Each structure stands twice: as C-alpha cells, then as structure tokens.
Image (cartoon, grey):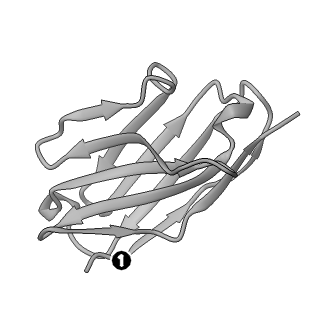
Amino acid sequence: QVQLVESGGGLVQPGGSLKLSCAASRSIFSLNLMAWYRQAPGKERELVAEITSSGTLTYANSVKGRFTISRDGAKNTEYLQMNDLKPEDTAVYYCSAIWNGRQDWGQGTQVTVSS
C-alpha cells in the first residue's frame, strides 16, 4: 500500500493560481503511475492529469494549458500547478498512485474558486 498525503488546497479568486502537493510513502519512481483526480458536488470523480513512471504526461482537455503535473523524486512528492483557475475547477482534488496492481488514494484537498 502507498500512503498519499495532499496539501495546498484553498480558496482562490478566478484567474488565480494554486499548487497542490502529494507526498508519497515510497519512492515515486517505483510507482507505475501517479495522478490527480477531482470530484465536484453531484458529479463523478474525473481524471485531471497523470504522469507515468517513464514521465509520460496526460491531461484532461478542460485543464490543458492551465494545469501542470510534475514530480520531485528527492522528496517523493507529486505536484499539480493550477493557473488561470475558473469557478468550474472547484472540487475536492485527490492524489492517486498505482503500484503493484493496486490503486491508492489520498484523503483529498478542497479547491474553491470564487470571487
């Protein structure tokens, strides 16, 4: 099992930026994939961005050009830099990792975009 702890959520005005962090309990380079998902009230959880062990990046169309996923192996931490935030980005953001055939989740961090 991989333990994941997110941080960095909060309240931001439209057009603002936030950077989410996800600290993993094991080397992130040993993980098959790390990703960020989000879930808005009344909606299903959706993939926001993912990065594979080889560094391949994938983004949801709704965040392309605004969000950037990255990682720091020395800190075993994954990041999601979110720029030009919109009210529709409001959701609970979850970090996820796939390792040894299992998908683990963090507890989630709330992001609210509102004026």
Q: Does residue 18 lie above or below 99 as drawn?
A: above
- Taking the view exactly as shown, the residue that stands out farthest to the right is 115
Residue appearing at x 15%, y 56% in the figure: 32
**Which quadrant holds residue 12?**
top right
In the rendered image, the quadrant that contains the C terminus is: top right
Q: Nearer the viewer, residue 32 or 71?
A: 32
User: At 29% from the left edge and 32% from the top edge, which residue is drawn?
Assistant: 58
Disc 1 is placed on an element classified as: loop
The percent coordinates of residue 1 (x first, y second) are 25, 80
- Does 62 appear above or below 28? above
Q: Residue furthest top?
A: 65
In percent of width and height, residue 103 lies at 27, 66
Q: What percent of the width, then of the height, locates residue 22?
A: 43, 60
In this view, the residue farthest toward the bottom is: 1
Classify residue 100 as left or right of residue 85. left
Q: Is residue 7 left or right of residue 105?
A: right
Residue 98's image quarter? bottom left
Relative to 53, say whether 108 is above or below: below
Q: In this image, 6 relative to 12: left or right?
A: left
Amino acid tagged 1? Gln
Of 67 and 46, the residue lying toward us: 46
Q: Position of residue 35 (x, y in %)?
A: 35, 50
Q: How many marks?
A: 1
The residue drawn where x is 20% and y is 67% is 27
- In this view, the residue in front, 41 or 10, is 41
User: On the image, numbered disc 1 is attached to which residue?
Assistant: 3
Please rate how many residues cluster around mark 1, counting C-alpha atoms within 10 Å: few if below 14, some from 14 to 19, many from 20. Answer: some
